[in-house]
Image (tube, rainbow, N blue to C red):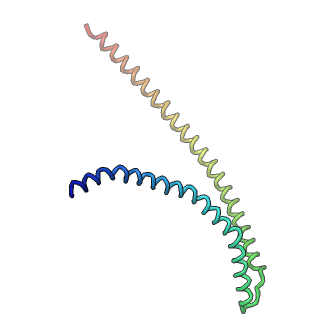
Amino acid sequence: MKAQAVRTRRQMTPMADMAKVAAAQRFEDARYWAAPRLESAAHGFEDQVAPKVSSMLTRAARKIDPTPMRSRRWPMLVLLTGVAVGAMGYMFYRRNAQQWTEHMKESASDASRWVSERADRASESADRMATDMSNKTDEASRKMP
């Protein structure tokens, strides 16, 4: 009995593996098919149903609200003031950024000039030292018999 079960298992294993692969492929195909349709349905709901429900709820809220409508001039004035202050802040930021950039360019050119001068001095010093060493070796070679 056990041997027959083992034999049956061996025969069924490849078929089970093939069925597993086929099922996975079908499942993936279904996902590829369903994903764009779900997205389209979601956009349709957002564009058509949601605005209507939102406006209906807004109208209902206004009808049952006991407080009178307030003037909208103050919020608009605050908004415009905020925009004006933001624009001025942006202009100051840009001006300071340009000044900072110019200052950094000047600092970089000063640093470059300083490094160049230091390199020239080091080069001259190395040349002098090489000349001195050459002169000393020439004198030492002349003194040797």
Q: Position of residue 67 (x, y in %)?
A: 73, 91
Quarter placement of the N terminus: bottom left
Count of marks overlaid on the render? 0
Q: Which of 69 and 58 is in front in this view?
A: 58
Quarter placement of the C terminus: top left
Q: Is residue 46 above or below residue 74?
A: above
Which residue corresponds to the image point at 65% horizontal and 62% vertical from the top-left?
40
Residue farthest bottom in this picture? 66
Residue 12 is left or right of residue 80, and the answer is left
Q: Position of residue 121 (x, y in %)?
A: 48, 31
Q: Is residue 22 above or below residue 56?
A: above
Residue farthest left in this picture? 2
**Residue 111 occupies quadrant:** top right
Q: Is residue 142 above or below residue 64?
A: above
Which residue corresponds to the image point at 21% horizontal and 54% vertical from the top-left?
3
Q: Nearer the viewer, residue 25 or 115?
A: 25
Which residue corresponds to the image point at 62% horizontal and 52% vertical from the top-left?
100
Residue 135 is left or right of residue 68, and the answer is left
Q: Position of residue 84 (x, y in %)?
A: 74, 67
Q: Position of residue 36 (x, y in %)?
A: 61, 58
Q: Which of 6 and 91 is in front in this view?
A: 6
Q: In this view, does 47 lie above or below 16?
A: below
Which residue corresponds to the image point at 73% horizontal and 73% vertical from the top-left?
79
